[in-house]
Amino acid sequence: MSRTQQAIAASNGRALIGYLPAGYPDQQGCVDACIALAEGGFTAIELGLPYSDPSLDGPVIQAATQGTLDRGFRIEEAFETIAEVTRRTSIPVLVMTYWNPVLRWGVDRFAARLAEVGGAGLITPDLVPENGTDWIAAADHHDLDRIFLAAPSSSDARLDVVLQASRGFVYTVSTMGTTGARGEMDSAARTLADRLETRRTALGIDLPRCVGLGISTGAQVADVLGYAEGAITGSALVAALRDGGQERLRERVADLAAGTLVQSH
Amino acid sequence: MNLRDVRGPEFGEYGGIHMPEPLMAAIDELAVAYEEARQDPAFGEELARLGREYTGRPSLLTEAKRLSASVGGARILLKREDLNHTGSHKINNVLGQALLAQRLGKTRLVAETGAGQHGVATATAAALFGMECTIYMGEVDTERQALNVARMRLLGAEVVPVTTGARTLKDAINEGMRDWVRTVDTSHYLMGTVAGPHPYPVMVRDFHAQIGEEARAQMLEQVGRLPDAVLACVGGGSNAMGIFHAFLDDADVRLIGLEAAGDGADTERHAVTIGRGTPGVLHGSRSYMLQDADGQTRDSHSISAGLDYPGVGPEHAWLHDIGRAEYEPVSDAEAMDAFRELTRLEGIMPAIESAHAVAGAMRLARELGPDAVLLVSLSGRGDKDVATAGQWFDVIDEGATQS
Ligand SMILES: Cc1ncc(COP(=O)(O)O)c(C=O)c1O
């Protein structure tokens, strides 16, 4: 059974998921940041693996992950971080990774190590379900969540494929673009969330929709939670860490988490 | 089945469509539109007309007699893509994709470029068709190919220097993809080589296949037989696939791709993707790539911006594995020697990319002796490389200007 989905259910469908880059600002700083999210009321953590060719990341996350790679980051460090965070808190930790590192490790070996350290599953931005047969099998075998993306441009047929392949939640891409704070949320997010609602009802699939890309304020979180079960935020957290360390991060966490308490109308 | 008839999405275990979900709809749309265009005689006719009246096709086949004599007498024939409008083979693919973009109702072209030749060709097509154009180019490449940056800007394109990663071609592709995901409604991503997700590898190869078709006919007419070997440089692999394709089912013709070996294939600074790489997924398709044990892409190195790429098109990976094509390294020093030889002996100054193919041909000529006949893809001209070559020869060979 999906721990992530249980955690989203326990939030009463008002989940808040935070992206943090593994190894940033350093190994211990990343653990501290994860703990700050867990203590600050976040529902789950999306731990991003720094990757040499992050084609869906905007400038803030790129700068953080590139610096991390430049200091010699290895993927094993992320597993150690997950082990420590899951030992100290009960928050589900999902790994967000581009696909080639998993392929290089070997899909089953990677999944086994993730399960061993207590990771909850994978978010795979550049893997579509059609190419994910090995991963879907490995996720089943190791009881891991597999979170695929649904995009505003996805046809209904593709939404069905994504809904049927996902476990945990569906990553509902808010806008056609890359990661990064945006002043205003796109109406595309709401339209996509509504389409996913129609499709999951038609298919009889009970899977939460968490909206990500561009969410950077508590007000935006409140807005998204008016029509979806979860909000995902990333660049705003990374920018806070970059500009003001753990202290600024905790302030940002509190601001964002406040958005889960406000009922938007 | 003929090797020539393989059309993807997979080439053996390589190729495929490995894209983020937001771009899947655009890729599907492109694949469908390309199949329709391919079967529409009007599309083919328009492209052929542009080839004749704009690019200057067919390109010449020139015998390099003084070069032959200097390497033991094997006949060396140069397929002169350097004479095309804009100075390289890249225009063949660009005109095809720009026409297709128009069919799709797109008004803007987005592309990456390494040496700048693909960017210049794309900016040229945008001017010709009245489209907007944005070109992403690694900052390292904007410096070593500054002339082409100026050309693109004069043609009306926006050139964006990319400062992330290694600041070369692979990072320019990443930035181009980020642009495309934002602008996909109005923009076509004009991939400059036979890499990327299906349909790019097969589509780009098709648009370049005329290189090999012309050359095969010209060989039969001018020499009276097919060559013993066809040689081409391989960055992503488009000029090589273009000239190889017509010969794929001529089992007696060796197909040899030359990869850029930078400081040397046995050093850490090279771009020998097939020779030294391992299979992985990069930029939308599965192929050989340079990567570390965590699957992070390794930086490539070559004096030639157009070959400085840690990936390669999937059809090449497949041709390598089935043994139909061979891939050999050529170092910076060997390529620059060939650049000088061809310039001095034939009065033809090649692009440094193409000089890698010339170096491979010179090596093979010495090995095979005077009975051999070699066909070389001279993919581009060297105007853009005058500054690099000037620097190289001043440093390496003080006497170069006097001899
Ligand atoms: C003249 C020339 N030849 C070759 C290449 C390498 O590309 P490809 O391997 O796709 O032919 C380039 C790329 O910029 C080029 O400008």
Image: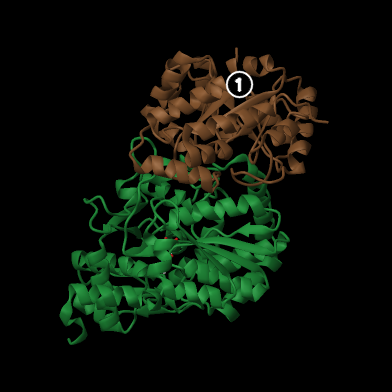
Chain colours: A brown, B green
Residue found at the far top of this picture? A1
- For mark 1, give the secondary structure: loop
In this rendering, the answer to whether B324 lies above or below A124 is: below
- Closest to the observer, B289 or B20: B20
Q: Is residue B353 at least partly visible in the picture? A: yes
- Closest to the observer, B225 or A24: A24
> How far across and down, in percent of the image, does residue A42 sit?
60, 23
* Quarter of the rendered structure image containing ligand 1: bottom left
Q: Residue at x 55, y 21 (%)?
A: A38
Q: Residue at x 40, y 43 (%)?
A: A67
In this rendering, the answer to whether B77 lies above or below A92 is: below
**Type of residue at label 1?**
Gly
Residue to which mark 1 is pinned: A41
| Residue B377 position by quadrant | bottom left
> How far across and down, in percent of the image, does residue A23 sit?
41, 33
Residue found at the far right of this picture? A265
- Closest to the observer, B184 or B36: B184
| Residue B9 position by quadrant | top right
Q: Residue at x 60, y 12 (%)?
A: A1
> How far across and down, in percent of the image, does residue B144 sit?
37, 69
**Residue A193 shown left or right of residue B157 in the figure:** right
**Residue A137 shown left or right of residue B102 in the figure:** left
| Residue B189 position by quadrant | bottom right
Q: State which chain disc 1 sits on.
A: A
Query: Which quarter of the rendered picture does the C terminus of chain A lie within?
Result: top right
**Residue A34 shown left or right of residue A228 in the figure:** left
